[in-house]
Structure formats: C-alpha cells, structure tokens
Image: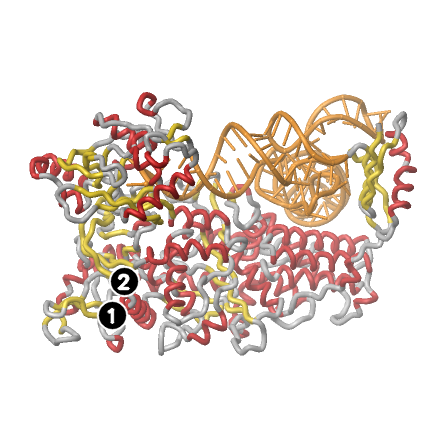
Amino acid sequence: MSEQTTEQGTGPATEEGRGGPPAYDIAATQDKWRPVWEKLDPFRAADDGARERRYALTMFPYPSGDLHMGHAEVMALHDVIARYWWQRGFDVMNPIGWDSFGLPAENAAIKRDENPATYTYANIETQAESFRRYGISFDWSRRLHTSDPEYYRWTQWLFLRFRERGLAYRKFSPVNWCPNDQTVLANEQVVQGTCERCGAEVTKRELSQWYFKVTDYAQRLLDDMDMLRGTWPERVLTMQRNWIGRSEGAHVEFEVEGREEPVTVFTTRPDTLYGATFFVVAADAALADEICAPEQREPFEAYREQVRRETDIDRLSSEREKTGVFLGRHAVNPVNGERVPVWAADYVLADYGTGAIMAVPAHDQRDLDFARTFGLPVRRVVDTGEDNPEETGVATGGDGRYVNSGELDGLTDKTSGISRIVERLEADGRGRGAVNFRLRDWLLSRQRFWGPPIPIVHCDRCGEVAVPDDQLPVELPDLRGADLKPKGVSPLAAATDWVNIECPRCGGPAKRDSDTMDTFVDSSWYFLRYCSPHYTEGPFDPEAVRRWMPAHQYVGGVEHAILHLLYSRFFTKVLHDMGMIDFVEPFAALLNQGQVINRGKSMSKSLGNGVNLGEMIDQYGVDAVRLTLVFAGPPEDDIDWADLSPGGSLKFLQRVWRLSGDVTSATGADVATGDVALRKVTHRAVHDAAELVEGQRFNVMVARVMELVNATRKAIDSGCGPADPAVREAVEAVAVMLSLVAPYTAEEMWERLGHEPTVAKAGWPAVDQALLVEESVTAIVQVQGKLRARLEVTPSISAADLEAKALADPAVVRSLEGKTVRKVIVREPNLVNVVAS
RNA sequence: GCCGGGUUGGCGGAAUGGCAGACGCUGCGGCCUCAAAAGCCGCUGUCCGAAAGGGCGUGUGGGUUCGAGUCCCACACCCGGCACCA
C-alpha cells in the first residue's frame, strides 16, 4: 500500500517485518481512541462533593470558520492544567461553549441570503468536531451557545435587573459610530480612533442609546484588583488601571455670566487656581451652546460644525494647532474674583470631567499652547526654578514655591498647596476635593440583528416599558439576506410584525426597542451559566455557582484584557450587590497565552503567512502539534511557528511510544526491587513536573519528561535492562505526565503497558520522598569566586570536612600557589569559596 | 510624556544570590546499510592551545556581596497599554 513512507509523517515510519523498529501510526491511534473516550466520557464533572472541585475555564470561541493555531495554542495550554487537576484527583469542571452572536455571522448571512443562525450553527458543529479530535478534556454536557433563546432569555433578564437598579439607562448623546459596520461602538471598541473590529475610521453621531453604568463601579474595579495581584498578569492589571484612569483633584465652581448656576470644573491642580487666566468649555458640550453670547453665536456655531466633522483620527493627530472660539462671556475665579474670558475649544472633551476647565497656561502645556495661539495671558504661580513658561513655551508642572497665590504664597510643595486651597474652597462653599475617572459608561446598544434584542417596549402613553419576565425571551424574528443589510438603524426596526406590539402595561399600540445588545453582554456572565447550564429558574443556580465559582483558572488571549475582563468583573460585582453571588471577582487566576505568529508577523491572509492547523495535524498528528505549542516557550510569550519543529515533537513521541513496547516486566511488578538510579530519576521528574505545572511552566515540565525519557532509554539499552521494574515505573510515569500534553500517545502507551483506559484518570504518580534524597552531591570549589574544582561528596558532609577536602584538591592547591588564604566560605554540601590574596 | 514587561549561544529557551546555556531545534562527526531514509551514539557559546588546561562571556556603565544572569542605581534598546483625560 504505502511504498513511499519516507516522508516524516503520520504513516508508518518503517515497513513491518523488515527488522526495523515497529511503526507508530499516530493517525490510526487518534481514530482508535476517540470513540473509546467518547464512550467513557471521563471528563464530566461529577459535582457530587466527593472530591474537591476545580473550575478550569477557557475563553469560549467565536464560531467563525474552523479552529486555527490561536485556538490550538490556548486549548493545549489550558488542557495541561485541566488534565493535571484530573490526575491529582480533583473534580474538574472544564466546560465549552460558543460566543455565537456577532457581526461576522450577520455579514456572512447577508452574502449568502440566509439567517445568521444557519452559518453560526454550522460553524459551531465544525469547531466542536475539531475540538473533539484535538482531544481537549471538555465537559460536553455543559455546552452552551449565547445565541440560543434559552441562553439569551437570561441575558435579557439580567439587563432588566440592571435597569431596575439604575445600572442600565438610556441617554441621548454623541456616540462612536462605525460607518462600515453601521453601528455604534463602545469606547472600549475604538482603538486609536478606528473600529476595533474592521479598522474603519470611527465618526460621531448623536443618538439615544442604552448604557451600563460601569462608572458607578470604577473605584471598586480598581480597588479589587488588589485581590488579583500575583495571580493575574501584571500587564493586564496595568491596562485596566490605565483604562479606568483614576485621577485625584478637586471640583471648583466658577460663576459664569449668562447662567444662574455656577459651572463646576475638575482639576488635578487646584493649587494653581490663582494662575487661571481663562476658562474653556468643550465646543460640543451643551454648556457651550447654553452660555454663548448672542454676538458670538455665529462664529461659535461655525466652529462647532467644524468640530463635529472631525473624526477621532483628526483629533488625535499630534502637533496639532489648538483651535477655539471666544464665547463672549467671562467666568469669575472663586479665589480672587478675577474675570477671565470663556472660550470654546475641542481640546477639552465633553464627556470627561464636567466638559469645562479652568486654564492655567503657566503650568499646563495644553493650556499654554492655547494661550500662545490666541494671545491670552500667562501667569506663573509656582516658581519651579525653571525658565518662565511664557517665554519658553514650556509649561512647568513640578513642585516649587508658590507666588502670586494669596494664602499659598511661600509654600513649596504641591501636596500642601493642594490641601490648603481645597480647605479654603470647602470653607467658602466653592469647591471640594474630588476624584475623576477616565472610564466611560458602557454603550451596549447595537444597530444590528444578530444579538439579543433589548427587552424594552416604547409606548407613546407609558414611555419605556420593560418586557415582563414571563414574556422573555424576546426572540429574534426570522430575517435573512437583504433584510439584514445595515441601514444605519437596526434591521429589526423594519420587521413590522415583530416591532409593532401592544404595550405590556396599557395594551395600547407600542414598538419594541429594535436595537440588540453588544455581544460582550453575553460573554459577561457565561462562566456563571456553565455551573448550571440547564437551569430554568434563573440565569444560574446560586447553589451551583457557590460550589464552583470563582473560576480557579481562566486562560485566554490578552486582547480581552480590557473589554471582556473588565465587563465580566463589573457584572460579577453587580450580581454580588444583587445578592445573587457571594464573591466579587470572577476569576481567581488568569493566564494570557502569547500569540502564535509566523516569520515574525502575526498570521494573516494578506501576508500569506498563515499556518493551516488542519494540515499540521494531518502531517504530524494532534499530539505533536500540541506538544510543539506547549514546549515552545513560556505560555505567556509569543511563539513564532517558524522557530518550532513539529517534526521534532513527532520524533520524540515515537521515541516515547517505542519505550512502552520495550517494557518486559509484568504489570504490578515489585518496583521496590528495581534499579535505584533510574527510580531516583523518575521520582525526581514526577516531583519537579508537578511543581512546574502548578507554576505554569509547562515548557520546562516537558523538558523534565524528556530527561526522564532519555534516562529510561539509556537504562534499557545500557543499564538495568528492559525487564527491571524500575523501567516500567519510569515509562508509566512518562505516560501519565505526557497525558497532559499528548493524550493519544499516552493512551496508546498505557494500553501497551497492560492497562485499561483511560490514562487520563490514572492518577498522578506518588513520589517517594526517600528517592528524592541524593546519596552524593557535587560540591563546587571556587577560588576568588572562580570555579576550580568539583568534588563528589555525601550530602551529610560537615563544613570542616568539606573545607579540608576542598583545600586538599590539587587544582585548588595549584590556583592558591603563592597566595595566602584569607577566608573560606563553606556552604555544605554544595560550595566552598576560598578567598585569598 | 506616564504606566507595565523585557534584553542569556546560530535559533526557541533553562538556571531557591552559589557549576551559565538544562531540554529541544539546527549543524557537524560516527554506527547501522550495497546505498539511502529512519533509528542509535557523540560533539556543537567564544578565543588561545596538538592536548591537558586556561582566558572571556547573560544589552551598557556603576554598586552591594566571599560570590551577581539573578539584588540596588543610572542608561540604551525592544514589546505592550494609556495619552489634548484637565
């Protein structure tokens, strides 16, 4: 049949019966064990309390196309942890599901003239099949899809609970708009002024949209990160911290002509209040429109139009000239009564702080740039010893001596300056210490079809009315093809039969809210649903959640460092406040795997450097691909496929497999009589491997197993021989340890060793502490810190004996010639360092 | 600019303050073979040396220490985040 099997591949490496080593057919092994495992169903969480529970969670996939290298890597790493826990005797919950709402399915459906569900569920089946083949230890009984009505019913239910608590609200304001996807975007989905998904330049629109009030939780989202320090990657915590963007300062009230109420500004430098020489309002804020003097209306409106046309890309371009327009009004500085002109400008943002600032050009670069552009005065109130900003054009932001600052004059540091002025403002009722956040509320409405409908009805008489719980889910109508085309309003708005209903409150004519929710809402609580995926009384069974959550380990890509993880943390806190759960952080530990790149660049169609996972698996087998990814380096580092050697991995697996055929002792042979040297290597390897897995150093764990394999090979060929029970012990240990990474090969070995499936539940080998003790250690002898000799000594050697032995060593004597020994440092039994001169 | 992470052979990467380079890839040599493939064995940081042996080596410069890849200070470069956020 196969006359050409010389290619490194999955076929038999050698023809049978020719005296060569027997062949390991990885493809046949995969086909052999899959049905056996499916029948055994070994990875179903028992949830019976018999064993300690562990929740292994991996970020659920989005069903576009088949699995790719990225999935392969994250799942391989994740599975090491899950399978290790099984071997350690835990009751593991390792669920899988699909984040199955979203735009790509909708766009595909338009092209194919079908309902997005068709494409979505077909892809899910393809991926599910691939995951099964890939041998991940998922508990398939907990499978969920966020686009199933029985799932999104509860997404809608949660939305309504949030709304009852004032955490979901509608407001009319400028929003980010993606002209390509024809929908609004959350702040988190705008990257450098472009759409995170499609890369189109984001523009602004004024729309009435639903928001989640994440800002109410800003401080807690920040504070609770303390609990995650050490178990979450530092960079994720940093990214969230940056995103939340807490800043401390003060609110200061300014009286403004043409307005009854004073205008509040936020500033981090209230101590420079005496240096405020003008006042700026965001051009697109309602306040600017309100206070603009009649004679300045024309230029103001022209300017505002210009600002509105700008995209974020324009705004962000650096070295940009400051623009603005005088509003014909003055504001009054609350500490010195000075009248300062009020300007509108676009460098002040409408949705940060109060949308208005006091401008202190001497000590803020942006204000200084503006002042120099429009010839506004600059007054220095902090003398930092640097040159006058008015002359240099460089604002000074550091500590210094206060001048021209009334009661602050003479103080020399910011901290006391700030507290002094805040006290004064509070006493005068003109301000107070305040904290401000960069974080904005989460815009959750989307003008697209393939998402959970927002369960709200708009009634002319009753206004906004929640769909009663017993009428949930609000299911999507069966739209397809052209009906889904983006038109700037949700496709649902045109589905008249669906949109027009009776008001649930008054029975009068009403319309459904035709927007759907951001798919990040779906993924903000799926990990809770997994605990009781078929529960019908609520989104989750509180008892089941109490048993499993928080997830012990979450594994996924760093691309979700802000979006998904921040939202999930927010949901968790809200559910906690609702009394539905008793913890405040959903994920106890987080592992961000690196990306798989190819030839230095991330894989993409346009670069033509994609590596096809299916082809790799066909060529090298599942186990070799998984092994390659796990062994490549630390899990959190990017790995370049071009640097890796799946052929080498396959070679190793074949070597290991042969090992299992070489064992000639019977199962249950008395290992106590086995070769001690090999046994020591085995027990050391098992001991180290456990620690390494727990420290998530999977690549090093693989290296330890390789060392054991090498030692075993040697023992068989030129040591104790294949019949020694220590060889069986070693090979069995290899099979169990390898089952975390290469389950098919491990299973095949296990069978060849005379055991019943499945090796996945064989249990982590017990370590005999006595075998970890070495009977001799290599002590190193240094002279002046340089290595001069090695000594084989007993671990119990005394300091004096070791020193004597070291000083007697010929090499040491030689290097001490003509020198006087000043000092000898002895760290028995490992080291002697002789200090001489 | 601010915050976080990093920099070790030809390559991916190992090293509780104590033998730098584990494990693997690549390369070279050998065994087996008519030959090759596969497999197995050995070598593979760099310089001097026939060898024994020795010098030098973890981005740069300082410091602490008997001893520093590891700790401290300064700097350079790379990666990631935030950034007209008051």
> In the rendered view of the protein, which quadrant contains the C terminus of chain A?
top right
Q: Position of residue A280 (x, y in %)?
A: 22, 38
The numbered dot on residue A671 is none
**Badge 2 amino acid:** Ala
Question: Which residue is nearer to you in this view: A828 or B27?
Answer: A828
Callout 2: few (<14), some (14-19), or many (20+) C-alpha neighbours within 10 Å? many
Asked if residue A4 shows in the view, the reply is: no
- Viewer-nearest of discs 1 and 2: 2
- Residue at 81%, 56% (x, y): give it: A677
Q: Position of residue A288 (x, y in %)?
A: 17, 42
Give the structural element (helix, strand or loop) at label 2.
Answer: strand
- Residue at 20%, 35% (x, y): give it: A339
The relative height of residue A414 versus residue A158 in the rendered view (above or below) is: above
- Residue at 7%, 39% (x, y): give it: A294
The relative height of residue A204 versus residue A573 in the rendered view (above or below) is: above
**Tag 2 subunit:** A
User: Of the residues under marks 1 and 2, which one precedes in the sequence?
Assistant: 2
Question: Which residue is nearer to you in this view: A383 or A521?
Answer: A383
**What residue is shown with label 2?**
A168
**What residue is shown with label 1?**
A475
Could you give the CA–CA distance between mark 1 and mark 2, rounded to whole angstroms?
20 Å
**Tag 1 subunit:** A
Question: Which residue is nearer to you in this view: A68 or A631?
Answer: A631
